[in-house]
Amino acid sequence: MKTLIAYFSHVGENLQDNEIVVLEKGNTEVVAEKLAELTDGDLFKIEEEEPYPFKYDDCLRRARREDENNEHPAMKGGPRLNMDDYDTVYIGFPIWYRTYPRVVASFLDQYDFAGKKIKPFCTNDEGTFGISLLEMQGALRGASIADGLAIRGVDVHKAEERIKAYAE
Ligand SMILES: Cc1cc2nc3c(=O)[nH]c(=O)nc-3n(C[C@H](O)[C@H](O)[C@H](O)COP(=O)(O)O)c2cc1C
């Protein structure tokens, strides 16, 4: 059985130390790539069909709208993983508006995760998972969900030891 690292990461303006910055590579992507290296797992990038806005304010507005209406926006590419191949699935995302971006909810809809070991990880500005883990527990009944690894966006490049420990 194999390990999958599925993640979403936003290209564009982000909130870091309460300031708006543009990153060359998304924070969650940095962590996802390290996990793939450490576990020899397959990387899968969750992408939305209608791109999230580049500008932070616009992106936040859309994130709030999707959250308030409980939208699960279409994913680019549709379901194309054979989930039966994997026994361990890392699921990574930035915290948006206190939980995972709604396109990650769309990803969770697409597959049956029952019986799998789920290892959530997130990057954020405030340091916590917000309500995302609780929400994931509700969405993935029958899966065994680990406590999770939360890393502040400003710390992703100095989190090697924590990432290593989580990958074991
Ligand atoms: C639309 C939007 C909403 C955000 N909301 C939160 C939030 O509620 N709490 C938080 O700690 N960080 C929030 N952030 C900051 C991101 O979680 C953080 O910058 C993260 O590391 C971005 O990861 P990425 O580069 O992989 O997309 C938000 C960022 C964006 C763009």
Image (cartoon, rainbow, N blue to C red):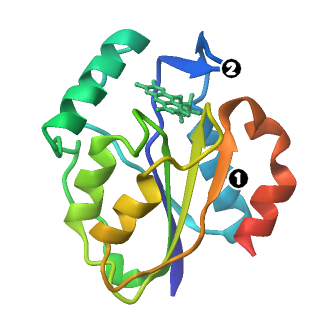
Going by the numbered disc 2, the residue's amino acid type is: Asp
Q: Quadrant of residue 30?
A: top right
Quarter of the image holding residue 81?
bottom left
At mark 1, the secondary structure is helix
Residue 19 rendering spot, x and y as whole percentages:
62, 11
The one nearer the camera, 155 or 54, is 155
Q: Secondary structure at mark 2?
A: loop
Could you tell me which residue is drawn at 43 percent across and 44 percent down?
A: 8
Identify the image quadrant of residue 115: bottom left
Up-down relation of residue 146 to residue 65 (above or below): below
What's the residue type where badge 1 is placed?
Answer: Lys
Disc 1 designates what residue? Answer: 34
Q: Kindly report the distance in space between the C-alpha atoms of the residues bearing marks 2 and 1.
A: 23 Å
Q: Position of residue 95 (x, y in %)?
A: 48, 39
Q: Measured from the top left, where is residue 71 in percent x and y?
A: 15, 42
Residue 49 can be seen, yes or no: no
Which residue, given by chain and number where applicable, does mark 2 sit on? 17
Q: Is residue 7 left or right of residue 127?
A: left
Q: Is residue 28 above or below residue 50?
A: below
